[in-house]
Structure formats: structure tokens, C-alpha cells
Image (spheres, rainbow, N blue to C red):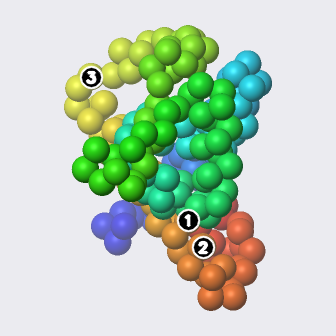
Amino acid sequence: MDHLESGDRRIHRRLTGQIKDALRDLNNRLSMLNRQVGVHLSLKDIDMDCLDLISRHGPLSPSALARRARLHPATVTGILDRLEHAGWIARERDPADRRAVTVRALPDRGREMHRLFAGMNSAMDSICAEYDERQLKLLADFLRKAADAGLTATRDLAADTSSGDSGAPGAPGAPGARS
């Protein structure tokens, strides 16, 4: 940012702040949407998060899901029990190693969830239609980098917690702190 002049730095800081605020708003509104979908499907937020990981990255072993979700394996066992009982997933023996279990999402219930997200998916399609290919590539790149930054901040915070440093989220200089 050294190449920016004083006025340009102020504009850059202001726009960066607007982007961070918009991402917070997006996070809150998507959380509200997910809660409403969860209410319709009788699913807890964490169950929906794990189901999404299984749907996008599965089949997964329960331990691989625990690593991806950054949850304790015992917690994942309870989540998988609920999802299996409700018909969202199937646990199956791994054909390569009959001692191992994999988890996969069941498509019939997935269609039910897709129906509830149809309004948001249609809105996203309409929004994306307003941008050209170059702009969409830029947005996709930004969102990937933002998601990676969130994962890094999560890992750093988890490492701080495990080392006994319980730095308060939102403290000056903390990931996600307002600037």
C-alpha cells in the first residue's frame, strides 16, 4: 500500500472497512437463513454445517469430518447419529478397509434442502448475471482468499486456546476486529 498517496490510503481504508462490514452482514444474514432452513428441517446449525461438508466433500470418514469441521470426534458421533436417524446420511463400510466407516449424504433429503435454499440460489444467480466473466473471477478469487483467511484465523485462535492464551475475540489486532 506504499504506492498509494495519503488521500488514496483513506479511500482504500474506507472501502476495506465497507467490505468487512458487508461480509459481517452477509455472515449474519446467511446464519439467519440457515437457522430458518434448520427449523423447517428440524436440524441444528452444527448438523447442517456437517451435512454440508459431507455433501460437498464426501464420502468422508467420521474422523475426516471432525478435522474438517474442527470438532471433537465424540461430538461428530452425536451429530452423525442424529443425521443418520433423520435419513440425511448413510454410514457404510469402506470397501477398501472393511474396518473403516465412511459417511455419505443421501440424495433424497438433499433435494428437500435444495428446495428451501431455492430462493437464495435464484437471487445469487440474478446477482451474478450482473457481472462479466472477469468480474466474477475477481469476486471468486476474493471470496476464496477471505474463506482461507477465516480458516487461518480459526486455526490460530484454536492454537492460542490450546496453549492457554485465551485472547478475547474482537480485541484490537484480533482477526475479525473492526478497524
Locate the N terminus by quadrant: bottom left
Image position, residue 53 (x, y; %): 47, 42
Image point (43%, 56%), residue name: 64
| SS state under label 1 | helix
**How far separated are the C-alphas under marks 1 and 3?**
33 Å
Q: Is residue 130 placed above or below 71 in the rendered structure? A: above
Q: Which residue is mark 3?
A: 132
Image mark for residue 157: 2
- Closest to the camera, between mark 2 and mark 3, is 2
Image point (52%, 70%), residue name: 155
Q: Is 92 or 2 nearer to us in this picture? A: 92
Say which label, 1 or 3, has the lower sequence index.
3
Residue 174 can be seen, yes or no: yes
Q: Which residue is mark 1?
A: 154
Which quadrant holds residue 43? top right
Residue density around tag 2, few if under 14, some if 14–19, many if 20 or more, within 10 Å: some
Q: Is residue 48 placed above or below 78 in the rendered structure? A: above
**How far separated are the C-alphas under marks 1 and 2?**
5 Å
**How far separated are the C-alphas under marks 2 and 3?**
37 Å
Give the amino acid type for the residue marked by disc 2 in the picture: Leu
Give the amino acid type for the residue marked by disc 1 in the picture: Thr
Horizontal relation, residue 170 to residue 143: left or right: right
